[in-house]
Amino acid sequence: MNIDDILMHDETIFKNREAFNPNYVPDNFPHRESQITSLIFSLRPALRGGKPLNTLVLGSPATGKTTAIKKVFQKLEERSDKVACVYVNCQIHTTRFNIFSQIQKKILGYLPPETGIPFSRVYQNIMRHLADEKKALVVALDDVNYLFHSKNANKIFYDILRAHEEFEGVRTGLFAVISDIEFRYLLDKNVDSIFIPQEIVFDPYTQEEMRDILKERVKAGFYPDVISENFLDKIAEYAWSMGDLRAGINLLGLVGNIAEAGASKTITKEHLKTALKNTSSISLKNTIKTLSSDEKRLLQIIMVSGDDDLIAGNLYKLLNKAKTLSYASFDRILNKLEFLRIIDIKFTGKGMKGNSRVIILRFDTKEIEKCMDNI
Ligand SMILES: Nc1ncnc2c1ncn2[C@@H]1O[C@H](COP(=O)(O)OP(=O)(O)OP(=O)(O)O)[C@@H](O)[C@H]1O
Ligand SMILES: [Mg+2]
């Protein structure tokens, strides 16, 4: 290795490491112009004293649905203070109270206390404020299918869309986001006719489009000439074969870390080979690194239990021997671990109201232990 190829300690190949993080919102967002235009079209009436159009956003995973909505919301809020745009991740916030807490936080700037205040008060605070300020409200319920298990969807839709009946002049609209066509049918089953949306479809990207997007990401994340066009082709091919743009973005971040750990100024064939071999365990390690101590504790208890049919209620008892964590907090942590794809949560149809859930680890215990030890 040439001495020039060896990086000094404080040097890095990353111009912006964040560019490979899951919640990074890119400046450039190619190949989604028509969807962005349609989303803006849905919001436009709200700027002119009307209601936002109810909208169903459909498309398979990693087709840019979440990012498009976040970008459009951000743009709108820069332009006008007459529309409150609230983004809610329903994988994490599943109850009526939780979701309206998020709405309150966005509108009033603070969360209501977790206990001791009834839902109706939170609801009134929000709607009164909107009426006083003459603001419209649009709520994006991302991955809305997560509300179907708990049968919360209809109530929440109703709360949002019928607000004008109780609070005169309040103008509200809903964006519902789903990533599986099966959920389209479930949506109709779960939500009455109060939600008649226009649909915006996010088609899968072609291989060329994926390459384009990955190239933009390389520009945003790495210094020039860190990765060759040829390797970029290979990464685009990999993402395409997985049917998942996200896999390509993760691979870019991973291969960058491997190159950097090897003190190299460029990404080589060997780095790419290693990255492809390690994609799952390295991304797991990065995910585990971001967990809070409560989240790690829960994960450890799931691992130690060694139970393939671990029921959520039993897990809570194991976790909460010291009685320090509310069930709501426990539930949120569980949903977050599922959101991060560390565990799966399956509804068994048994238990009280048929709501009993089984927790399944998506990784081998040893693999997780190794990641935890390495941190
Ligand atoms: N057109 C694009 N340009 C740049 N980056 C994109 C584009 N489309 C998607 N991405 C990136 O791909 C990743 C996945 O996008 P996003 O989370 O918006 O997809 P999604 O459709 O919401 O997926 P899911 O259904 O899994 O929630 C993100 O890192 C995002 O920045
Ligand atoms: Mg999404």
Image (tube, rainbow, N blue to C red):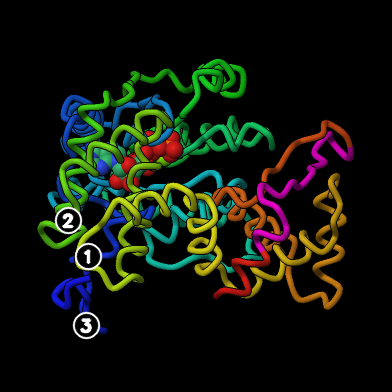
From which residue to which does the magenta span run?
A: 351-368
Q: In the shown orientation, is residue 46 left or right of residue 129?
A: left
Mark toward the start of the polypeptide (3 vs 2) = 3
- First-in-chain label (3 vs 1): 3
Cβ atoms under marks 1 and 2 closer than 8 Å: yes
Kindly report the distance in space between the C-alpha atoms of the residues bearing marks 3 and 2. 22 Å
- Mark 1 and mark 2 lie on one chain; the one further toward the N terminus is 1
**In the depicted view, which residue is nearer to us: 316 or 352?**
316
Residue matched to label 1: 16
* Tag nearer the camera, 3 or 2: 3
Residue at image position (22%, 73%) is: 12
Can you give x and y, in whole percent of width and height, for residue 245 in the image? 34, 37
Q: Residue type at mark 1: give it.
A: Asn
Going by the numbered disc 3, the residue's amino acid type is Met
Q: Which residue is mark 3?
A: 8
Q: Amino acid at mark 2?
A: Ala
Which residue is rendered at x = 40% and y = 34% of the image?
A: 244
Image position, residue 21 (x, y; %): 35, 57
Seen at 73% across and 38% down, the residue is 346
* Ligand 1 within 8 angstroms of badge 3 C-beta: no
Against 348, residue 7 (above or below) is below
